[in-house]
Amino acid sequence: MKKVALALTLLLLVTGSALAAYPEKNLQGYIMWGAGGAMDNVTRAIVPIAQEHLGKTIILQNRTGATGAIATTFVANQPADGYSILFGAENPNLYKVTGLSQIDYDQFDPVFLMMANVGVVLVGKDSPYTTYKELIEAAASGKTITMGSTGPGGLPFVATTMIEKIHDLKFNKMQFDGEGPCITALMGGHIDAVAVGLLAAANFIKSDSVRGLAVISKERIDSIPAVPAITEAYEEYVPYLPWGAFFGAFVRKGTPAEALEALQSAFQKGYEDPRFDEFAKSTGGVKLGLTGEKAREYIQQNKSVSAWLLHDAGGAKHSPEEFGIPRP
Amino acid sequence: MEQNLQYFLIPFLNWDMMLLIWVGVFAGIWVGAIPGLSVTMAASLLISFTFSWDLNNALALICGVFVGGVYGGSITAILLNIPGAPAAIATGIEGYPLAQLGEAGKAIGLCTTVSVFASFVGILVLAVAAPVVANFSLKFSPRDFFLLAVMGVLLIGSIGGGDPIKGITAGAIGVLLSMVGMDPSTGELRYTFGNIYLMAGISFVTAMIGLFGVSEALTQFRNAGKGSPKQNLDKIIPSWATFIKYLPLSIRSSLLGVFIGALPGTGGDVAALLAYDQAKRSVRHPSRPFGTGAYEGIVAPETANKGAIGGAFIPMLTLGIPGDAVTAIIIGALYIHGLKPGPMLMIETPHLFWMIVSCLSIASIALMVLGLVSVKPFSKIIEIPKSIIMPVVIILSVIGTYAIQNSVVDIFYMIGFGIIGYFMRLYGYATGPMVLGLILGPMLDANYRRAMQGAENQLLPFLEGFFTSPISLVLTLSIVFLLFSQTKTYRRWRGIS
C-alpha cells in the first residue's frame, strides 16, 4: 500500500512538472545587431513589457556579426524548447542567395513581428533637388549622383538597387557601415542622396536637417505626412511593395505549441501597451503587429523582392530559384 | 539663460541623481579597470536595467559610469601594464615604468588631477560651443578620416618600443588581422576559410585583452621571483607648481581630445594616442626620457581621453549623431524613454542638454574625490605578490572577453593572442602596435575606399582632393610635417638631439 502511494505521488510529481505552465524559468534573448541600433532599440522597448505578461525575465544579449548570421546560427542550434528567442531583422532573408549561411527564417517560427522600417530617399537640406522626379531625371540625364549605401543586403543597398533597376540608372555609390553614418555623410555634403530606413531618418527629416523626397511605400507615412509616397511619382514601384526592413522575435521550428502561444500572447500584449506605442511614435517606425501565418507571408514577400532584386543586380552568388523563392 | 541655469541645477538639487552619479563613477572606475569590461558594455547593460526608471536618474548613472570608466582603464595601465581600454594604451607606456620606480602613487595622483581638469575642458566646450564644433565635425569627409588614420599609423614609431622595424612588423600584422571577416563594402568574405566565427572578424578588444592582459601575466610569471617595488605614497596630490607646469600641455591635449571625440565614430582611443605622439614630439625636456616614465606621457593621453567624453556628447546632443560607441548607446536609451534624439532634441527638450552638462560636471567632481581617495589602496595592488595578482588578471581577462558578446570562441582568440603576445615580448616586439593596427586597419580600409568611391574611382580627382579641400590640406600638411620633423635637418635646426 505504501509503495502504491509512493508510486502515485511520484507519478503526480512527474506529470505535475510536465504540466507546469511555460515558462518555468528565465528565457534567453539574442539580438542579432549591436547595442544602440534600431533592432536593439525595438527589442529593448518591447521585452520589458512582454515579460511582465510572461512572468519570467528575458535575459537579453547582443550577438552580433556577419549581418546577424552568428546569432541566427546560434539560436538554431539551441534546443527547440521556447527558452531561446532570436530577435532578428530582415537580413536572414538574403543569407541563402548571398551564400552567407544556409540557416535563415525557414528554420524558425515567427513569434511576433513588431515593427516595419520603410525606406525613405533623402537629399541634403541645401540640395538642388526638391522632388523625387528631379533627382531621378538628373541621374537619367547622365549627371553623376553619389548615393550612400551599405554592404550588400542592407536596406540602403537593396533600395538603391530597386531604384536603379526600375529607372535603368547607375548611381555612383559610396559605402558606409550603416544608416547612421550615411545620414552623417549626407549632412556633411559628402554624398548627394541616400535611401535609408525611416527609423534612422525620421528625426532628421522633421528637423529639416535633411530633405525627404519620397517614402518607398504605396502610401504616405503618418509620422512624416509631408513626404510623398514613391508611387505618387512613379507607378512602376507598385509590384515591389510593401517592402522594407522588419524587426521580429523568432523561436526554432518545433517549439511546443504551448510555448509558442504563450510567447505570442505576451508579445501581443506588449505590442498593444501604450508604452510601446509611445516608443513607436517617437522613432517614426511603422507598427506591424503580425504573428503566425500572416507574419510568415510578410517575411516571404520581403524575401522574394529582396532576393530577386539582389540577383538581378548581380549581387547574389546563387539564384533565388535554387531555393524555390518565387519572383515577386 | 536663467532657464538654462535652472536645468543645470536639477541634478545638484536632486539627491537621487546626485547619489547615482557618485555610484556610477565609483562603479565605472572598477568596470574600466578590469580588462574587457568596457564602458560601452556597462552602458548597454544599464539601459535594460534602468528601463523602468525615470530618465533623469538613468542618465545620471550612465554619465557617472562613462566618466569613471574612462579613468579606471588608466589605473591598471599604470599599475600592472594592462590598459583597461584602448584609450589607456599610451598611459601604460609611461605609467608602468613609473610604478616600477615606486612612483605609482604620484603618477595616479597626477593622472587624476589632469583628468578632472580635461573633463571640465570638454564640458566647457560642450556647453558654450557645441553647435559650432558639431557643424565643423560634419565637414570631415572620408578622405579626412583616411588622413587621420594615416597619422595614426605614424604613431607606431612612438609606441613601438626601441626597434622601428619590429614595431612596423607588429603593426602590419595587426592591420592584416583587422581585414579578416566580411568586406565592409562588398560583403565579400576575406580570410574566413568558410568559418562562420571568422566572418564576424577579429574584435580588437578581444585581441587587446590577450595581447596586454594575458601576455603581461605570462611575462610576469617568468619574473615571478623578483620582489615588487616599494611604493612611495607621501605626495599623491601634485603641487600647484607641478599642475601649472603641465598646464599648457594639458590644455593642448584636452582640446585635441574634445575635437577628436566630437568627430563621429572616433573616440578617446584615437585621441589619446595622437596626444601622446604630439607630446612626444613637442615636449623638449620631459621629466624623464619618453618610454622610461615621462610624466608628460601620462598627462597628454589622459587629458585627451577625458576631453573626448565632453566631445563625444557634442554631435550627439546637437545633431543626434553619436560621437563614439557610448553616446551611440545613450541615443538608443533616449529613444526607449520616448525622446527624440536628433537636431530637435535641444529645441524640444532643452533641459536634457543642460542636465547632461551638469551630470558630467558632478561626475568630474566625484572623480576627483574618489580618484584621490583610492590612490593608496590602488597602489597597494602592486605590492600584492605576482603569484596572486596574475592568476586573477587571467581569470578577469577570460570573464571580460566572454562578456563582450557572450562568445566562447572569443576566449580562444583571446588566449591565442595572449600566447602570441608573450612570445612577441620575449623577442622584443611591443604589443601596442599590433593593437593599433587592429584599430586603424578598418578605418584605413573603409575610408580609403569611400574616398575613392567619392572620386568615382579615378586616381586624379582622388589625389586632387588632398589639396582642394581645406581640411584635407591641413591634415596632409601635418603629415608631411610629422615626417619632416623626423629628419636630421629639422632636428638640428630645432636643437633636438
Image (cartoon, rainbow, N blue to C red):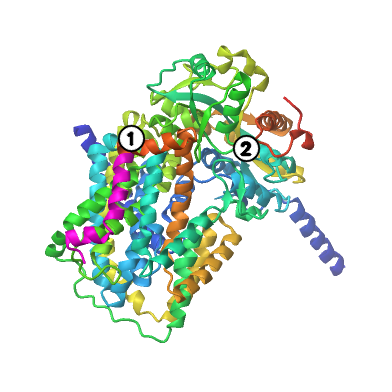
Q: Residue at x 25, y 59 (%)?
A: B281
Q: Residue at x 45, y 26 (%)?
A: A192
Looking at the image, residue A231 sits to the left or right of residue A212; the answer is right
Q: CA distance from mark 1 to mark 2?
A: 44 Å
Q: Residues within 10 Å of mark 1 (few under 14, many from 20)?
A: some
Q: Is residue B426 visible?
A: yes
Q: Chain of mark 1?
A: B
Give the image location of residue B488, x and y in percent. 25, 62
| Quadrant in which residue A125 is drawn | top left
Residue at which label 1 appears: B469
Give the image location of residue B425, x and y in percent. 44, 73
Tell me which amino acid carries mark 2.
Gly
Give the image location of residue B153, x and y in percent. 39, 55
Span highlighted in magenta in the image: B472-497
The mark closer to the camera, 1 or 2, is 1
Residue found at the very far front of the displayed protein: B489
Q: Residue at x 58, y 65 (%)?
A: B412
Residue at which label 2 appears: A248
Q: Is residue B368 visible?
A: no
Tell me which amino acid carries mark 1.
Ser
Q: Which quadrant would the N terminus of chain B be assigned to in this image?
A: top left
Residue found at the very far left of the displayed protein: B241
**Numbered disc total:** 2
Q: Residues within 10 Å of mark 2 (few under 14, many from 20)?
A: many
Q: Are marks 1 and 2 on the same chain?
A: no
Looking at the image, residue B391 sits to the left or right of residue B243; the answer is right
Q: State if disc 2 and disc 1 touch (CB < 8 Å).
A: no
| Quadrant in which residue B14 is drawn | top left
Q: Secondary structure at mark 2?
A: strand
Give the image location of residue B41, x and y in percent. 46, 53
